[in-house]
């Protein structure tokens, strides 16, 4: 791990890259969130929770695992889950073996909402992000971004769920296909 010194500067291309990343990331997420809220009444965080549950065994995760996967605090995930429970998209399930543990479980309504919202979300990703790059650019960008902290946690998967579309891309297909392919019941 490197440590900045009083002589360390962030300028030129390094500063431009960092600021471009920060600004575009914030703008794209803000727009994707606004589209999901306007069209489906859910946020990108809600979508991420539904997606994680859809991809999990038995479509359920412990609250602590859900917090880890979404990088939210335990109190943050609790508040988010409370809203999704209230809207009927997920339900809480108690652990038979440990009363301290509870699970979030995706309901049929939640799965249906995820499938519908997925089309909006993918269209937004294509318009706001992918349309700005050639296929070669996307492949290079995926390779470059894979060096960032947390990027190694991406396991493939998909960003929506749809029974009528082929399964997620395999490892030898482009990264953009892996991230946004429409897939079978266990994918996003």
Image (cartoon, grey):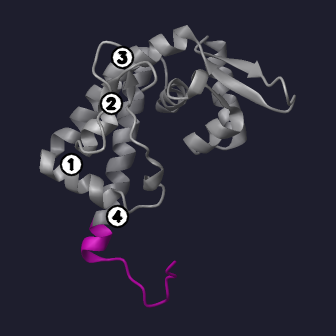
Asked whether, in this view, residue 87 is left or right of residue 15, the answer is: right
Circle 2 — which element? loop
The residue lying at 46 percent from left, 23 percent from top is 186
Residue at label 2? 168
Query: Crowding near pointer 1: few (<14 within 10 Å), some, many (20+)?
Result: some
> Is 141 covered by the magenta stretch?
no
Region of the chain picked out in magenta, as a range: 1-16
Query: Crowding near pointer 2: few (<14 within 10 Å), some, many (20+)?
Result: many
Circle 1 — which element? helix
Compare marks 4 and 1 and give the one earlier in the sequence. 4
Compare marks 1 and 3 and give the one earlier in the sequence. 1
Q: Which mark is residue 124?
A: none
Residue at label 1? 138
Residue at label 4? 18
Residue furthest right in the image? 99
Distance (Cα) linking label 1 and label 3? 24 Å
Q: Are marks 3 and 2 in contact (CB under 8 Å)?
A: no
């Amino acid at each position: 791990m490197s440590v900045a010194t009083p002589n360390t500067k962030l300028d030129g291309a390094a500063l431009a890259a960092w600021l471009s990343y920060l600004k575009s990331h914030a703008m794209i997420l803000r727009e994707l969130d606004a589209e999901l809220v306007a069209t489906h009444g859910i946020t990108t965080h809600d979508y991420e929770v539904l997606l994680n549950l859809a991809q999990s065994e038995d479509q359920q995760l412990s609250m602590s695992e859900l917090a880890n996967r979404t990088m939210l605090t335990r109190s943050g995930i609790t508040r988010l889950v409370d809203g999704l429970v209230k809207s009927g998209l997920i339900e809480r399930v108690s652990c038979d073996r440990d009363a301290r543990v509870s699970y979030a479980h995706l309901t049929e309504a939640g799965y249906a909402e995820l499938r519908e919202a997925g089309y909006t979300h993918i269209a937004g990703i294509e318009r706001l992000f992918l349309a700005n790059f050639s296929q070669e650019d996307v492949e290079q960008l995926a390779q470059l971004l894979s060096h960032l902290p947390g990027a190694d946690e991406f396991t493939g998967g998909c960003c929506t769920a749809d029974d009528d579309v082929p399964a997620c891309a395999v490892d030898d297909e482009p990264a953009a296909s892996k991230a946004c392919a429409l897939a079978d019941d266990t994918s996003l």
